[in-house]
Image: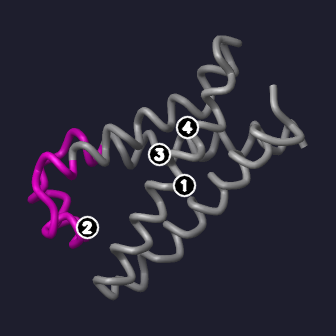
Amino acid sequence: MNVVLWIIAGLLAAAFLAAGAMKALQPKTKLIESGMGWAADLSDGQVKLIGVVEVLGAIGLVLPALLDIAPVLVPIAATGLVITMIGAVVVHVRRKENQAILPSAVLLVLSAVVAWGRFGPYSF
Protein backbone atom coordinates (compact mmCIF):
# COMPACT_ATOMS: atom_id res chain seq x y z
CA MET A 1 0.00 0.00 0.00
CA ASN A 2 2.94 2.32 0.63
CA VAL A 3 3.95 2.03 -3.03
CA VAL A 4 0.38 2.71 -4.17
CA LEU A 5 0.22 5.85 -2.02
CA TRP A 6 3.56 7.04 -3.43
CA ILE A 7 2.30 6.51 -6.99
CA ILE A 8 -0.97 8.33 -6.31
CA ALA A 9 0.88 11.19 -4.58
CA GLY A 10 3.31 11.45 -7.49
CA LEU A 11 0.54 11.54 -10.09
CA LEU A 12 -1.40 14.09 -8.04
CA ALA A 13 1.71 16.21 -7.61
CA ALA A 14 2.30 16.25 -11.38
CA ALA A 15 -1.33 17.15 -12.10
CA PHE A 16 -1.56 19.88 -9.47
CA LEU A 17 1.86 21.30 -10.36
CA ALA A 18 0.87 21.63 -14.02
CA ALA A 19 -2.62 23.00 -13.33
CA GLY A 20 -1.44 25.32 -10.59
CA ALA A 21 1.46 26.72 -12.59
CA MET A 22 -0.89 27.41 -15.49
CA LYS A 23 -3.30 29.30 -13.23
CA ALA A 24 -0.54 31.18 -11.45
CA LEU A 25 1.42 32.18 -14.55
CA GLN A 26 -1.12 32.79 -17.32
CA PRO A 27 -3.39 35.83 -17.50
CA LYS A 28 -6.98 35.23 -16.49
CA THR A 29 -8.25 36.14 -19.95
CA LYS A 30 -6.12 33.42 -21.53
CA LEU A 31 -7.47 30.87 -19.04
CA ILE A 32 -11.04 31.86 -19.87
CA GLU A 33 -10.34 31.60 -23.60
CA SER A 34 -8.86 28.12 -23.10
CA GLY A 35 -12.11 26.83 -21.60
CA MET A 36 -11.83 27.71 -17.92
CA GLY A 37 -15.03 29.76 -17.82
CA TRP A 38 -15.14 29.62 -14.03
CA ALA A 39 -12.23 32.07 -13.93
CA ALA A 40 -14.55 34.82 -15.17
CA ASP A 41 -16.36 34.68 -11.82
CA LEU A 42 -13.16 35.33 -9.83
CA SER A 43 -10.68 38.18 -9.60
CA ASP A 44 -7.18 37.91 -11.03
CA GLY A 45 -5.81 37.56 -7.50
CA GLN A 46 -8.18 34.75 -6.62
CA VAL A 47 -7.23 32.76 -9.74
CA LYS A 48 -3.52 33.27 -8.97
CA LEU A 49 -4.10 32.24 -5.35
CA ILE A 50 -5.76 28.99 -6.46
CA GLY A 51 -2.76 28.34 -8.69
CA VAL A 52 -0.27 28.97 -5.88
CA VAL A 53 -2.26 26.74 -3.50
CA GLU A 54 -2.21 23.93 -6.06
CA VAL A 55 1.55 24.31 -6.64
CA LEU A 56 2.27 24.32 -2.90
CA GLY A 57 -0.01 21.31 -2.45
CA ALA A 58 1.85 19.46 -5.19
CA ILE A 59 5.17 20.16 -3.53
CA GLY A 60 3.76 19.17 -0.14
CA LEU A 61 2.57 15.81 -1.45
CA VAL A 62 6.06 14.51 -2.18
CA LEU A 63 8.91 16.72 -1.01
CA PRO A 64 8.57 16.37 2.80
CA ALA A 65 8.52 12.57 2.63
CA LEU A 66 11.18 12.42 -0.07
CA LEU A 67 13.57 14.53 2.03
CA ASP A 68 12.35 12.99 5.29
CA ILE A 69 11.82 16.48 6.71
CA ALA A 70 8.46 16.84 8.47
CA PRO A 71 6.69 14.06 6.52
CA VAL A 72 3.50 14.88 8.46
CA LEU A 73 3.12 17.68 5.91
CA VAL A 74 2.17 15.11 3.23
CA PRO A 75 -1.30 14.28 4.64
CA ILE A 76 -1.79 17.94 5.57
CA ALA A 77 -1.08 18.94 1.95
CA ALA A 78 -3.42 16.19 0.73
CA THR A 79 -6.16 17.47 3.05
CA GLY A 80 -5.64 20.99 1.74
CA LEU A 81 -6.03 19.71 -1.80
CA VAL A 82 -9.23 17.86 -0.80
CA ILE A 83 -10.64 21.18 0.44
CA THR A 84 -9.50 22.91 -2.75
CA MET A 85 -11.16 20.26 -4.91
CA ILE A 86 -14.40 20.42 -2.90
CA GLY A 87 -14.47 24.10 -3.82
CA ALA A 88 -13.78 23.24 -7.47
CA VAL A 89 -16.61 20.69 -7.60
CA VAL A 90 -19.01 23.18 -6.01
CA VAL A 91 -18.06 25.89 -8.52
CA HIS A 92 -18.46 23.54 -11.48
CA VAL A 93 -21.83 22.26 -10.23
CA ARG A 94 -23.12 25.81 -9.70
CA ARG A 95 -21.94 26.85 -13.17
CA LYS A 96 -23.37 23.64 -14.69
CA GLU A 97 -19.93 22.80 -16.14
CA ASN A 98 -20.66 19.08 -16.19
CA GLN A 99 -17.54 18.16 -18.16
CA ALA A 100 -15.32 19.63 -15.42
CA ILE A 101 -17.01 17.95 -12.43
CA LEU A 102 -15.62 14.44 -12.98
CA PRO A 103 -11.91 15.38 -13.18
CA SER A 104 -12.25 17.55 -10.08
CA ALA A 105 -14.06 14.76 -8.24
CA VAL A 106 -11.38 12.23 -9.21
CA LEU A 107 -8.62 14.53 -7.92
CA LEU A 108 -10.65 15.03 -4.73
CA VAL A 109 -11.01 11.29 -4.13
CA LEU A 110 -7.34 10.55 -4.87
CA SER A 111 -6.24 13.36 -2.54
CA ALA A 112 -8.55 11.96 0.15
CA VAL A 113 -6.99 8.51 -0.27
CA VAL A 114 -3.50 9.95 0.25
CA ALA A 115 -4.67 11.94 3.28
CA TRP A 116 -6.36 8.85 4.78
CA GLY A 117 -3.38 6.60 4.13
CA ARG A 118 -0.72 8.97 5.37
CA PHE A 119 -2.66 10.14 8.44
CA GLY A 120 -3.74 6.59 9.20
CA PRO A 121 -2.35 3.13 8.80
CA TYR A 122 0.38 3.94 6.28
CA SER A 123 1.95 7.04 7.80
CA PHE A 124 5.67 7.66 7.54
Residue appearing at x 75%, y 49% in the figure: 116
Contact (Cβ within 8 Å) of mark 4 with mark 2: no
Q: Residues within 10 Å of mark 3 (few under 14, many from 20)?
A: many
Task: Return the residue nearer the eye: 121 or 114.
Answer: 121
The amino acid type found where label 4 is placed reads Ala
As helix, strand or loop, the secondary structure at mark 2 comes to: loop
| Location of mark 3 (residue) | 16
Queried whether the magenta region covers residue 35, the answer comes back as yes
Is the residue marked by circle 2 packed among few (<14), some (14-19), or many (20+) residues within 10 Å? Answer: some
Q: The C terminus appears in which quarter of the rendering? A: top right
Q: Real-space Cα distance between discs 3 and 1?
A: 12 Å
**Residue 62 in the image: above or below residue 47:** above
Q: Secondary structure at mark 4?
A: helix
Disc 1: which residue: 82
- Side (left or right) of 32 relative to 98: left
Tag in front: 3 or 4: 4
Residue matched to label 2: 36
User: Which residue does the numbered mark 4 point to in the structure image?
Assistant: 77
* Whole-percent x, y for residue 15 in the image: 50, 48
Kind of element beneath mark 1: helix
The image shows residue 10 at horizontal and vertical percentages of 65, 38
Prevailing secondary structure class for the magenta stretch in the rendered image: helix
Q: Earlier in the sequence, mark 3 or mark 4?
A: 3
Quick one: 11 or 88, which is closer to the camera?
88
Using residue 38 as the reference point, say whether residue 75 is left or right of it. Answer: right
* Mark toward the start of the polypeptide (2 vs 1): 2
| Distance Cα–Cα, label 2 vs label 1 | 20 Å
Q: Are marks 3 and 4 in contact (CB under 8 Å)?
A: no
What separation in Å lies between label 4 and label 2 (alpha carbons)? 24 Å
The residue positioned 57% from the left and 61% from the top of the image is: 108
Residue in the image at 53% along x and 41% along y: 14
Which contiguous range is marked in magenta? Answer: 22-47
